[in-house]
Amino acid sequence: MAKTRARTKDNTKLGKGGETHQTASSPDRNLTTNQGVTIADNQNSLRAGTRGPTLLEDVILREKITHFDHERIPERIVHARGSGAHGYFQVLEPLGDLTKAAFLQDPKKRTPVFARFSTVVGGAGSGDLPRDVRGFAVKFYTEEGNFDLIGNNIPVFFIQDAIKFPDLIHSVKMEPDRGFPQAGSAHDTFWDFATLMPESMHMLMWVMSDRAIPRSLRMMEGFGIHTFRFVDARDRSTFVKFHWRPTIGSASVVWDEAVKINGADPDFHRRDLWEAIARGEFPEWEFAVQAFDQKTADRLGFDVLDATKLIPEEIVPLRVIGKMVLNRNPDNFFAETEQVAFHPGHVVPGIDFTDDPLLQGRLFSYLDTQLSRLGGPNFHELPINAPKCPMRNFQRDGMMRMEVAKGRVSYEPNTLAPDSPRENPQQGFRTLPTTDSGLKARERSESFSDHYSHARLFWRSMSEPEQRHIVSAFGFELGKVEAVAIRRRMLGHLHVIEPELGARVEKVLGMEGQAETIRPVRPPVDMKPSRSLSLVHKAPATLAGRRIGALVSDGTDTALIASLRSAAKRAGARLDVIAPKAAGAEGNGGHIDADHALAGAPSIFFDAVVVAVSKAGAERLVHEAAAIDWIRDAYGHLKVIGRVSGAAALFDRAGVDDDEGLVDLASAKAVTAFIEAAKRGRVWDREPRLRNPEA
Ligand code: HDE
């Protein structure tokens, strides 16, 4: 009787310990071992006596636990934390004038891609919003083989030569004795190394800028960094720099917000990418190149083989050649996002390398790292890494070989297998013939020796708020450095980059006049500022892909929420309702479902907010710190805030001053005014009233 009662329609019964046994309803649902043997009991190990020791004989337990013990593979030494998605790439017009690459010829064709975005420094389980460079890696599964474009969201790099990479990474990763800080550059070893490496100055400016705390992976620009080559059918080569530009514009968070997001939702970026794709809001980027010839390269005044330099768009404009759309989430994070193996050496005919010494070192490193990360030389057989075009050669065996190669012949040339694969001089990949020769020496070219002009260019190209943030970021990071000599050294470099910058950071630190004197090998020259380097200068007025949060309570005006929702939708944004309780609230026109409970949805998650609580609701919420912080943070993070008159008590308690970013929602017209204000993004003018680290 008890047995019958415990069974349900889906073959569930309760075990003696009260645990659930779900038994297979048909043989094709049988749970099996890895050898295909059906498992009778997945809840109890084999023991000598019901309270006795577990037996070594339990091969089922041991198989299951052994597999589990080995579920993790070594994480990437850099870029360990990443989020990926599938999609496609489409070229805008045939590019035969530049390259013979087949996937860049037919605007009707869609080339499948897998993109992985990452932070650099932290481990796989670290938060999404440290101050850090973001990786931007794309695998194109072209009909001529895989092309991997492994870039970053910053167009330059810290070092000029690959031989310095292990030192750079050791300095920025957690310090080896103490195991902290995790995922952050604000510590002595990083700044010790960086300040001894003047070539890193340009990159440091970028990393201290808002670029290093992006709002969303969908809103990041991407760059191939190195100069690559396109090669056309007649072996004519053109230098190219690769660029990705998000169609919904770029945006960043503010530092205080980043710090809080890391606590409230360490998966903020990963979740945002996943949810956008799941909702059908497919992230999209324009793909562009800066194409130039040797003559232009010679005129630039710096070396295009030096990865610490960029070519301003005003000098070599961007040519948009295609677009990438990410439209499918991975089925399995491990099998795809974790096991994907990128390598800058994965190029196809029509794309070639240059002698950039950083790129040349990478051409060794990525294949080598996969051997240890993925356990052997057969990682190309994993579905995420396998080309989608035919692949055949005489490589054989090795750990975890999947392919069952047939026949006697595993060599070439041969006569015993006339149908076996052969080289093809016409279609095959041929390295562009160039005449490289010179002194064999460990010596840097003189053309790599200007380390400050581009850093100055970047500083001068920033808007005022962006300059403020750079100053604060240097102040914050150097403030965390304990060795005063390192701070002084960095201040010296900042003075060379721009005396005003040096003086302002000194002020933040309270170290006026303490900069070490740095004498550059080559004094900086003044370059023409480039507006395209500034996120603020080129920010589009848009809410596309953004999130608006509306705080409601019992008694909230339901019509207002409905009109906000449709206005947000029209603007391409999404409205999330936040109520004191997860079940929602009783509005004046009926029940309002909540997307989040207040405790789980601080205003840091939203790009603009509305406080739509009723008067009675506000009076109750003045005793709720989460509600006060909701407003204070939104204000402090320079967001546009819509408010109803009933919310006055809450605003009084939060102590925010009126400004153009506070919009009263008294009428339907006011909703439009709120949306228009929110499209303009952050209220930068508010910032100096709230935060002035130099004071
Ligand atoms: Fe990487 N880098 N890197 N890197 N890198 C790796 O390869 C390396 C550099 C970048 O989502 C590793 O598979 C060296 C520049 C991205 O899986 C490793 C040097 C740029 C990713 C490696 C550099 C990058 C990596 C670690 C100096 C921007 C993540 C795991 C010469 C253009 C790819 C792996 C992904 C990953 C080595 C410098 C971007 C160890 C030696 C410059 C986006 O091979």
Image: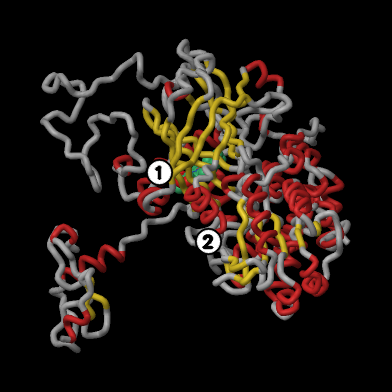
Q: In the rendered image, which quarter contains the C terminus?
A: bottom right
Mark 1 lies on a secondary structure that is loop
Q: Is residue 490 visible?
A: no
Q: Is residue 448 left or right of residue 127?
A: right
Q: Position of residue 169 (x, y in %)?
A: 55, 52
* Disc 1 CB within 8 Å of nearest ligand 1 atom: yes
| Numbered circle sitting on residue 58 | none
Front residue (pair 539, 355): 539
Look at label 2 and name its amino acid.
Ser
Q: Position of residue 158 (x, y in %)?
A: 63, 44
* Residue wearing tag 1: 341
Mark 1 neighbour class, 10 Å CA radius: few under 14, some 14 to 19, many 20 or more: many
What residue appears at the point 11 percent right and 31 percent down from the top-left corner?
A: 407
Q: Is residue 156 left or right of residue 81?
A: right
Look at label 1 and name its amino acid.
Ala
| Numbered circle sitting on residue 126 | 2
First in sequence: mark 2 vs mark 1: 2
Q: For residue 249, which quarter of the picture?
A: top right
Mark 2 lies on a secondary structure that is loop
Q: Is residue 469 left or right of residue 397?
A: right
Vertical relation: 15 (above or below) 521: below
Vertical relation: 108 (above or below) 486: above
Q: Is residue 671 left or right of residue 431?
A: right
Q: In the rendered image, which quarter contains the N terminus?
A: bottom left
Q: Is residue 142 visible?
A: yes
Mark 2 neighbour class, 10 Å CA radius: few under 14, some 14 to 19, many 20 or more: some
Q: For residue 71, which quarter of the picture?
A: bottom left
Vertical relation: 73 (above or below) 445: below
Front residue (pair 274, 522): 274
